[in-house]
Image (cartoon, coloured by chain):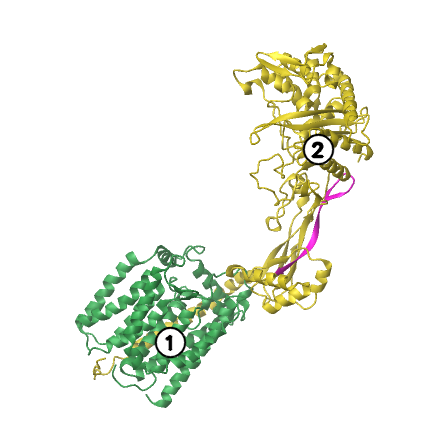
Amino acid sequence: MRAIEEDPRPALSLLPFGVLAVSVFALLLGRAAELQLGERASRAQAQVAAKRQRVTTLQAPRGRVLGARGQVLAEDRLERDLLVTPSRVNAAGVDALALRLGLGEAAREALRARLAAMPPNKRHLPVVVRRGLTAGELEKLRGEKIAGVQIEEVYRRHYPGERLSYPGLFPVGRLFSPLLGHVGRAGAGREGKAGVERRYDEQLRGAPGRHKEPSSRWVKGEPEEITPATPGRDVELTIDGALQKDALLALLEARTQSGAAIVLNPKTGAVLASVSIPAVSPGVLPGGHGHQTPGDRPWLDRTRQLAHPPGALVTPFVALAASEEDLTESRTCKGYMLVGKRIFRCTHSHGKLNTEQAIAQSCLMFSYDVGANIGLDALGDVLRQSGMVGSVGYPLGEPASAMPNRAWYGDPFRLGFTLASSVGQGNVRVSPLGVAVAYAALANGGRVLTPRLEAASPITERGRLPSLDRLPMIRRALVARGKEIASSLTLLEHPPHGVAATRASGQVSFQQEGGLHDVGWFAGWAPADEPEAVVVVRVETGERSAAVEAGMKILDRTTKHEEP
Amino acid sequence: MIASTSKTYRAGLGLTSLGLLLAGLAAQHSATPGAPPAFWALAALPLMALAARPPLLVVVRSAPVLFGLGVLAACVPFLQHGVRGTHRWLRVDRFSMQPAEFLKVALVLILAWGLGRREQPRGPREAALLAGLVGAAVLPTLLSPDLGTSLVLVLVAATMLAHERFTPGGRALAALAGVVGVPLFARFGLHSYQKARIAHFLAGDDPLGAGYQSAQALRLVASGGPLGEGLGSWAGLEPHPLPQASNDFILAVWGHETGLLGVAAVLCGLALLVGLLLRVAAAATGAPRRVATGVAALFFWQSALNVAMVFGLLPVVGVPLPLISQGGSALAACAFALALGWAATRDEPRTA
């Protein structure tokens, strides 16, 4: 490198720069004094002081859901979770924690790996490493505190029978799901998400409290409650827990994997049991939401949210419509009926029979004939009046149903549409709840009652069945049919006697399976003369007779249970 | 320089740096709750002493190589994937650094080298060459985009050149470069977020948007009061009101925790550091004088811009506070710059 002679003149003075530097630093110091002394500082201190206290929400325990006999169907339990903050716990702390919990080497490594895997921006947040600590574990964790380890109290919802399992048929489900529904996570306010929990959420939820505490260990002060949490109120249902379990077991013993059963008190409209399978705890949905097989959609309350053709369950109501139109004369069943080029068949040739016999023998020709004479719309009116179709005022939501009228079909309208509807096939859809309301009206003398779920709710009559003078005849017919059904049951050791009942099958087309699939129905009440319980069962898979088997078992058990 | 005086300067530089480093450690520990204290930062001091051992002239002679490497390193991030839309970080495997921080020191060295190659006064040709060197450092930094560092580079270069003799033609050229360059930069060089920050600063609005950090920093500094809320009290604020407080806004944390007393101590420390470097420059001649002047300018402008930004006297430009803000690259660059100032205290031949 070439050396250059240094300029012989004196270098330019650094004094101006020095003066500039001193001036700027003095100016900045003055600005700091302006900011940190006087009113501005006081105002800022007051604003920042508010940040030194962490205000947290105190969970309010939800109210209990009680059954008719005082059984607890859902309740909040105070649990303690173990939380670890990855940024505050060190290796020795993890070892100490593992020692107190009695974790093995593999579990300890898994815990360590889990904490290490937390991303840097979330390491300051506590991680739940164990939910619901047992008393023994809590005892072990007492003593000297481990930095970064804390125990948090949380309320969790518990349902009896939530781990109910039935090997081979019913993996794991909840006895009262989806009737009771479920609640959201703690962070989301634990509001009711479905079923009873959602319907009575306002009553059950209560009001959370507020709690103030120093935001860190560097801040002095004691925790302080600002407003206490107000627990939610209990809700007492008409559901009989023991009967609910019996109904579920009856369905399961009938070897069906998909179905529903509902038990109604015909005098009060109280829902005594409401069972729907498959049912699993939320978040454990097998196959995902898009899975379309008869055994799917376990989140649905099948007693009201899934409708199928009722088949011959409509026959008593067709008879009521016939009475309205004065079509009660005797008929001759030849076993078939020719409409144009199409043949509508009965089960067999019944010969000459009156209305009572037609109901007792479930003669399709009778229904075809009445339907053809009164028309589709008149038939729909009777079904709507009975509560089988349309709204019934159920607190959890109206039952799914469909009863197309003539206008819905449009032109060209065919007689076949009416005939199919008059035997409960075609496009007629009903759900077990609607059928139960309609059969309760048959059982109680014609009063169509609103199904009640809350014990304190009043008995409400929505209307009356038409042609009440014909009811005794229809009830006699159903008693006779009940006897016939009971006598055909070979599986039951003691088939119930003195019941009024009928059975039916509804044809549903399944596109995936390329054909028709029958759902089995059972509807009946017992005792026949002084009805105390109306039972409706629908099975969507398995033998059609499974519905009868399950229905009879439930009816049998209702007579053994005391009315709540 | 008399040996005893140079020892005093070295001791002064070392002790002041240690004090500022310790203040930075305490503030960073508060600003990042849960993170272990960054004691490794204290290694800057022995590294500084080690880096000061080679004769300064040898370092100045290697300035072209160091500057070339610095510019190259500042350009390489443009070939890599950006981080949040910027190209400030050079990443090699898990290691990352900000080349612009080292470019500041390299610019001081290259200017000291370039200014020593021509007799004074310098004409337009020399002025243009020097301006070209400054431009080579500023351009990749500005495009990265890093407005704060670009500003520091320009101000450091201007300070160094202001202490050199130029012919009237040379001065005219430098003035012309400023008159043309600043409006062009304001029109085409500023990004939308930078414009928003300047607009907020001028209008004083948008405390929840572009002016959020500035408004929060002011409030937190003010809340420190005369004596502060106490070391560690920052961690008690929840939610933490100032994002990324450990970097450019570390003084807000320090001001909140130690109050006016602590802020005054840091400002005095920085002023003492600049003053010592200027004293070293005044006592030296040739390349050591220029290097010491450059390093003093570097510390002065960085400190002034950062503190003025935190105190709401300037828009947010993103300049770290020397020796106090978090960041390995900035700390290493500061340590290297101080090592040069330290080396300038030694007697050197009067040629470069």
**Chain coloured green in this rendering:** B
Q: Is residue B234 above or below residue B57?
A: above
Chain A colour?
A: yellow
Q: Which residue is mark 1?
A: B336
Crowd class of label 2 (few under 14; some 14 to 19; many from 20; radius 10 Å): many
Give percent across and percent down for residue B17: 43, 78
Q: Is residue A376 above or below residue B294?
A: above
In-front residue for pair A323/A426:
A426
Please state the chain letter of the residue tagged with numbered disc 1 in the rendered image. B
Please state the chain letter of the residue tagged with numbered disc 2 in the rendered image. A
Q: Quadrant of residue A388?
A: top right
Residues in magenta, as a range: A63-83
Give percent across and percent down for residue A486: 78, 26
Q: Is residue A430 magenta?
A: no
* B117 on left or right of A564: left
Q: Which residue is mark 2?
A: A261
Q: Look at the numbered disc 2 and give the secondary structure of its residue.
A: strand
Query: What residue type is disc 2 on?
Result: Ala
